[in-house]
Image (cartoon, rainbow, N blue to C red):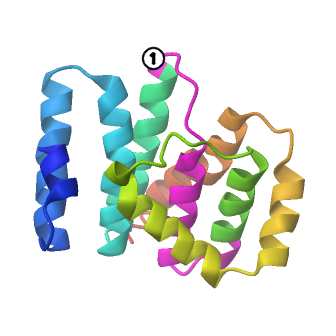
Amino acid sequence: QRDRAHRIRGIDDEEALAYLEKAATLDRELDDPWQLGDLLVELATYEATMARYTEAMRDLTEAVRLREQTNSQPNPFLLAVVAYVHHARGETAMATGALGAYDATGHTSAWATDDFRRPRTAVRTTRAALDPVAVAAAAEAAHGEPIAALLDRWISTPFADRASMGDSR
């Protein structure tokens, strides 16, 4: 399912989202937390594109939790995708901080394949829209912090705060 959503040209976002949701269900049924974690990051990108911010943050939070459960090193690209989600919500300061945190990690090439074209495009769009000086300052402030602390600051805590305030946006 997942490969099909990536490779079919000409399908709209709703159809791609449906494929990705089916793939997530299958990964859950197969108890494949590693595949599911990566899939949730891509799913969150589509959801944010479609103004489904609560779902996007929920999926990013679950991706972080899955990495913790499997004792896997979290992929720093999660921070770049959450920057896109914050930017799509109109939260420039949050987007700047998250993108700076991503830059502070030194990046990763794990998402350099065509399989993750949508997230990479979303991050490039976000980077182009943000003040590069502010992103660099955020990167400097985040430099040396453990990835787990950065993920908590830019993904888990904001999502929990919104949920506690009833923000479903």
Image position, residue 57 (x, y; %): 43, 55
Q: What range of the chain is rendered magenta? A: 69-93
Q: Which residue is mark 1?
A: 70
Q: Quadrant location of the C terminus?
A: bottom left
Give the image location of residue 76, x and y in percent. 61, 43
Residue at figure coordinates x 12%, y 53% from the top left: 19
Q: Quadrant of residue 128?
A: bottom right
Image quadrant where residue 69 sits: top left
The amino acid type found where label 1 is placed reads Thr
53 within the magenta span? no
In the figure, is residue 152 to the left or right of 54?
A: right
- Residue 33 x/y as whole percent: 33, 25
Residue 27, position as x, y percentages in the image = 19, 30
Depth check: 63 or 13 in front? 13
Is disc 1 surrounded by few (<14), some (14 to 19) or many (20+) residues within 10 Å?
A: few
Q: Is residue 101 left or right of residue 122?
A: right
Answer left or right for 30 relative to 129: left
| Along the line of sight, the residue nearer the viewer: 155 or 116 | 116
Query: How many marks do you count on the picture?
Result: 1
Going 44% across and 47% down the picture, which residue do you hit?
60
